[in-house]
Amino acid sequence: MPKSMPEATLLLRAAAKYLENELLPTLDGYHRFKTRVTANALHIVSRELMMRAAQEVEERKRLVDLLGHEGSVQELSGELCEKIRGGAFSLDDPRLREHIRESLHHALEINNPKWLTR
Amino acid sequence: MSNDDFVARLQAAVARHIGAPGTVHNFQRLTGGANKTTYSFDADIGAKREPFILQVPAPAPPPDENDPLAEYSVRISGDQDARLMIAAVKAGVPAPRVRAIFSEADGVDVGWVTERIEGETLMPRVLREERYASARKIMAAQCGEILARIHKIDLAEVPFLKYLSAARQIESYQMTADLLGLKLPALELTLRWAKENLPVNPRHTVVHGDYRAGNFIVGDEGIRCILDWEGAQAGDPMQDMGWVCVKTWRFGGRGPVGGFGRREDLFWAYEKASGHQVDPLHVRFWEAFGSTRWAIASLRLGTRGIEEVDIERSAIGRRIEEPLWDFLGLVEGRD
């Protein structure tokens, strides 16, 4: 499929910029709060579009290493969940901890990068 | 019912329960949540004008036999919230003083009127503004002392409080994730950790259930009042002690207790006021498990159906990793 221009991330950032720089200063109370939340949601989607594909490649690689076979991120994560629940991994397993820490770090880079420096 | 009509009936009910003439001024809606609506008003009682809060609980939804999570609900209903606050005040807790409990016979909704206490509930202000500097120094100890009193409320006076053990709470969170089809290894890790670290032989007391910064009214001199009693339950008192330390409720502040204070001050003040020794590892269980609780709450809020979709709630769904990240930090000793 030919890609439309400008890119989705640019459209989202333009929309967020309008909300934050032009609309927000004219608002207060309820709508000021909701508009801030809305602009933030656009930033989240924009970061997801930019970063998620590369993160998923790394995530899959870590899951394949941990579980010892191929599969999609979705399938492998489901299997890992069952193994954690069933006790097949020790909670102190450094590779398990590393995978979970990395996955959370990646998700926070998209959803709320500020949380990582709190 | 029109607003004027409602105010007229409120006035009559205030006159009957609190004092004549009961004339209502400045009636306004403050917040409307899923569980209750809160209004503020002033009323003339004798020659004095007094500040009040009116709270109206949402009618309890009919029991849904198909909801497998229903049996885990500890939700209180009707006027139980008010009856608990009355018991709390009696035990010396700074809770809102209940002035009247209305029933349908009063011609207004079932609800209750409390005194209105002035002060700040927005934590970013409490943590930042100079006027609260001395309050911030003593609030962790205050949190401990007040909590000790909450845990002394006689359970026999509030027999409607329900008990859900930590093990059953874990089950309900597991079920919530399963029903939504969420496959999140980080969440599984916290649930398994909780199973392996369950507190042994906890005491059994009244538990506030949502004891945290943001639910306190703060003045220049410190905590004035403890709000939001609708999450109350019977159970392990250390649940409250851990919840007040959960990082989500620090609002960016440095202190582990509510962003303003030290755990040591919370603990010694609690020990002194309650006569019970605090085991820091026991509290840590509830703090870590509190992160799981908030992760599940954001998941539930963020995954309502499209009919109920709302940008604020949906955005909360994207906060699930924050408490899971904090969980790792806590159990790996970085916090």
Image (cartoon, coloured by chain):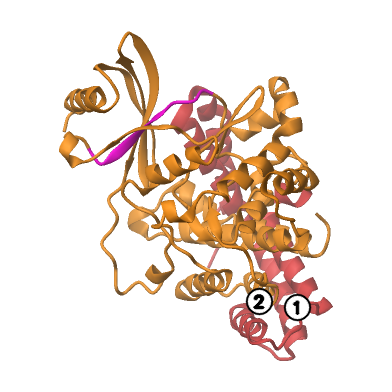
Indicate the secondary structure of the residue bearing disc 1. loop
**Residue B318, quarter of the rendered image:** bottom right
Based on the picture, tell me whether residue B116 belongs to the magenta stretch: yes
Residue designated by label 1: A91
Count of number-bearing discs:
2
Locate the N terminus of chain B and report the quarter of the image it occupies: top left
Up-down relation of residue B314 to residue B39 (above or below): below
Residue A7 can be seen in this image: no
Residue B131 lies, in percent from the top left, at: 69, 20
Q: Which residues are magenta?
A: B109-118
Q: Residue at x 20, y 28 (%)?
A: B6
Q: Do tag 1 and tag 2 residues touch (Cβ < 8 Å)?
A: yes
Query: Which residue type does callout 2 highlight?
Result: Arg
**Residue B308, quarter of the rendered image:** bottom left
Label of residue B57 in the image: none
Residue designated by label 2: B192
